[in-house]
Image: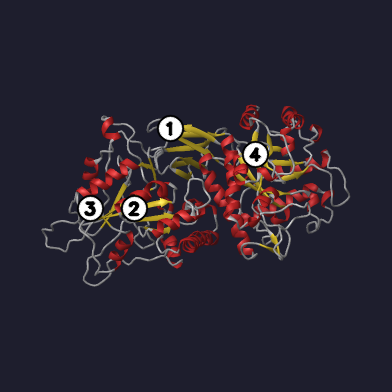
């Protein structure tokens, strides 16, 4: 019989206890086993800023209460060994402390406490964030933590996916491959970077089942066979995976201390002695149990539903973002968050994003407005030119144009605003072409939004000449070790470089903070040139892992902003069964992206298609067949694709202008595929309203 509890916590921790019997006197004369109490934390701060953060004063008061009541902090690994080895022992009142994710506050706030108090903690880390996300620690900090001898580093998968959601979106074979990547890559990266023995795993969101446990065991995580030694009572483990096992340890997310109290002085002083004492009070219970504290007036996890604003029908698989993390709606459009939050944001392909405030315990209803962007492109020079910018904006008055793609970092590494990220890394000082900056770029974004325009920030990733000048050690080199330049005499960055990842996501975060609806990554690929030298072997597996890894890292960092994530790919990537030797394997791009944007310019299909040798003579066929092929191979619906269409003179065949007939043939093909709109590319930002569908 299962009981589902909604837990509200004063202490900022959740306690999960394991054991066959509670410690203490046993009147029946049976052998008495200790109860193991596991405290689970995420972040530490001087103030509880969100639902996953514990005040440092609260944490230190909890340690004081533990000492006063005779509890002893033991490493999680000792508990694992105790569960496996019938000869192993534990102290009478053992407590384990674990911390999930790898937030930088572990190094900045928790480490001084560890060094002073000299106890051991286990960190469950998802390595995609390390040395990448602004909120996370660096690898240097993790290594320093391990060197103290007080920190055990273990796996929390590679980028903390929701396996329930991923299973719905993937074929069984693809799902198993995805899980193997998450488990194996996490273990491999953690061991390589820290030297730790990684054999324990914390399941993200506490989601696991027999299939996942089997896959984890095959990836060499420890399988626990608890209490199977002859003559010993079974030591069973209730709960979330502190390690992969047929009886996994259950864990809950951290909750902050109460913001409201009848005695403000007690809250300020972190005096939670009475509550913690009640939570740890021994009882003799001959079964598995969970210690709970249900306290009135505390914040609860948020529940609600996401609907289509036009039809009022539920939206399945919508993305839900709160301060507690990211989840998705079920088939009825409903969701439950992993913790309390003041607001809830939602987005779904084919809709505008939305946000709502949380009011008490009332379920939240978010209605998403259907929307398909129909965009034109503005370069760095276009958006900073009042004439070109106003010309593009005016298209919305007469035509179906309702969106703009704006260069935030263009092909030559230029930005239309003063970028703190570019200045900090030294790239801004290396630009040779000067472009006027928009003084108040966030204000411009706000004005364009006021004109009902959907805004997409285009960021050119690995083609970055100024960054290569500033940091040549991160750039692509020729076989003889000299910096490589492409046909435009521009340098490229090595897609294996974590520093390059970090910087481009810094720029993307600037776009998100300015209010862009979507971040679109372009040149997120390897150069289409053989014989170049990179930091790792230039193999298909390595290339695709680098590209997908970057996109996953970007998705993780940008998650709190609820922005859509998209990327541009070569048109032939829809057709080629390999990665086109540039790291773009279309079957792998659906998970980290909301939208995939193939560049379906007929002039770019220089080898044509089967049965079509002159693509510019039938531009609609290029779009129609390429989208159909992409949908077939990825098993994604049309709404997950938004193609780039050609609005410039042909350069590969007969040099014809692409007029209203050619442009509308492409648009009609994209609309027929039910794509998420389309985008028109003209490098000079010249668009004729007469060539476009009218309102």
Sequence-first disc among 3 and 2: 3
Q: Secondary structure at mark 4?
A: strand
- Residue position for label 3: 71
Sequence-first disc among 1 and 4: 1
Using the numbered discs, state the Cα–Cα distance from disc 3 to disc 2 in whole angstroms.
19 Å
Image disc number at residue 358: 1
Discs 3, 4 touching: Cβ within 8 Å = no
Quadrant hosting residue 480: bottom right
Using the numbered discs, state the Cα–Cα distance from disc 2 to disc 1 in whole angstroms.
40 Å
Sequence-first disc among 1 and 3: 3
Which of label 3 and label 4 is nearer to you? 3
- Residue position for label 4: 456
Q: Position of residue 307 (x, y in %)?
A: 52, 36
Which of label 1 and label 3 is nearer to you? 3
Q: Residue at x 24, y 70 (%)?
A: 87
Camera-side residue of 343 and 12:
12
Q: Is residue 130 above or below residue 642?
A: below
Image disc number at residue 115: 2
Quadrant hosting residue 387: top right
Q: Residues within 10 Å of mark 2 (few under 14, many from 20)?
A: few
Q: Is residue 375 above or below residue 390?
A: below
On the rendered image, what quadrant is the C terminus found in? top right
| Image position of 652 (left or right of 637) | right
């Amino acid at each position: 019989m299962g009981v589902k509890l909604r837990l509200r916590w004063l202490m900022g921790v959740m306690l999960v206890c394991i054991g066959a019997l509670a410690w203490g006197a046993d009147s029946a004369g049976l052998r008495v086993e200790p109860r193991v109490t596991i405290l689970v934390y995420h972040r530490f701060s001087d103030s509880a800023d969100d639902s996953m953060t514990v005040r440092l004063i609260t944490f230190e008061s909890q340690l004081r209460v533990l000492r006063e009541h005779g509890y002893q902090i033991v490493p999680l690994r000792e508990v694992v060994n105790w569960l496996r080895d019938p000869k192993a022992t534990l102290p009478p009142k053992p407590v384990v402390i674990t911390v999930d994710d790898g937030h930088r506050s572990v190094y900045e706030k928790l480490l001084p406490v560890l060094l002073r108090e000299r106890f051991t903690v286990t960190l469950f880390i998802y390595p995609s964030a390390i040395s990448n996300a602004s909120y996370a620690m660096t690898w240097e900090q993790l290594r320093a933590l391990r060197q103290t001898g007080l920190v055990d580093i273990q796996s929390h998968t590679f980028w903390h996916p929701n396996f329930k959601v991923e299973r719905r979106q993937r074929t069984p074979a693809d799902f198993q491959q995805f899980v193997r990547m998450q488990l194996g890559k996490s273990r491999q990266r953690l061991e390589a970077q820290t030297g730790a023995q990684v054999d324990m795993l914390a399941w993200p969101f506490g989601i696991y089942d027999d299939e996942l446990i089997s896959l984890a065991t095959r990836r060499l995580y420890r399988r626990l066979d608890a209490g199977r030694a002859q003559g010993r009572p079974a030591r069973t483990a209730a709960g979330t995976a502190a390690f992969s096992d047929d009886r996994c340890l259950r864990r809950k997310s951290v909750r902050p201390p109460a913001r409201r109290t009848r005695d403000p002085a007690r809250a300020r002083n972190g005096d939670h002695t009475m509550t913690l004492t009640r939570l740890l009070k021994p009882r003799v219970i001959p079964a598995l149990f969970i210690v709970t504290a249900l306290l009135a007036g505390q914040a609860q996890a948020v529940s609600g539903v996401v609907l289509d604003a036009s039809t009022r029908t539920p939206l399945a698989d919508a993305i839900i973002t709160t301060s507690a993390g990211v989840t998705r709606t079920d088939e009825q459009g409903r969701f439950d968050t992993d913790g309390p939050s003041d607001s809830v944001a939602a987005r779904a392909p084919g809709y505008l994003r939305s946000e709502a405030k949380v009011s008490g315990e009332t379920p939240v209803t978010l209605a998403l407005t259907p929307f398909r962007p129909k965009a034109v492109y503005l370069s760095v020079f276009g958006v900073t030119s009042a004439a070109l910018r106003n010309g593009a904006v005016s298209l919305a008055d007469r035509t179906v144009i309702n969106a703009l793609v704006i260069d935030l970092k263009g092909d030559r590494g230029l930005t239309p605003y003063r970028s703190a990220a570019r200045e900090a890394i030294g790239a801004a000082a290396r630009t040779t072409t000067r472009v006027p900056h928009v003084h108040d770029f966030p204000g411009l974004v706000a004005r364009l939004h006021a004109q009902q325009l959907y805004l997409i920030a285009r960021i050119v990733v690995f083609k970055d000449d100024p960054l290569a000048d500033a940091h040549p050690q991160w750039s692509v080199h020729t076989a003889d070790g000299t910096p490589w330049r492409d046909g435009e005499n521009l340098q490229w960055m090595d897609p294996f470089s974590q520093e390059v990842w970090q910087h481009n996501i810094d720029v993307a975060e600037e776009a998100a903070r300015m209010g862009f609806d979507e971040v679109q990554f372009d040149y997120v690929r390897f150069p289409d040139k053989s014989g170049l030298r990179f930091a790792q072997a230039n193999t298909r597996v390595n290339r695709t892992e680098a590209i997908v890894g970057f996109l996953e890292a970007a998705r993780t960092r940008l998650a709190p902003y609820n922005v859509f994530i998209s990327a541009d790919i070569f048109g032939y990537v829809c057709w080629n069964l390999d990665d086109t030797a540039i790291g773009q394997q279309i079957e792998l791009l659906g998970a980290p992206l909301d939208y995939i944007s193939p560049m379906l310019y007929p002039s770019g299909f220089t080898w044509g298609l089967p049965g079509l040798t002159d693509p510019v003579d039938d531009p609609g066929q290029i779009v129609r067949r390429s989208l159909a092929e992409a949908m077939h191979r990825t098993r994604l619906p049309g709404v997950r694709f938004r193609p780039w269409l050609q609005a410039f003179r042909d350069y590969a065949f007969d040099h014809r202008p692409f007029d209203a007939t050619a442009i509308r043939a492409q648009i009609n093909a994209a609309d027929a595929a039910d794509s998420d709109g389309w985008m028109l590319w003209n490098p000079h930002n010249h668009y004729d309203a007469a060539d476009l569908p009218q309102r």
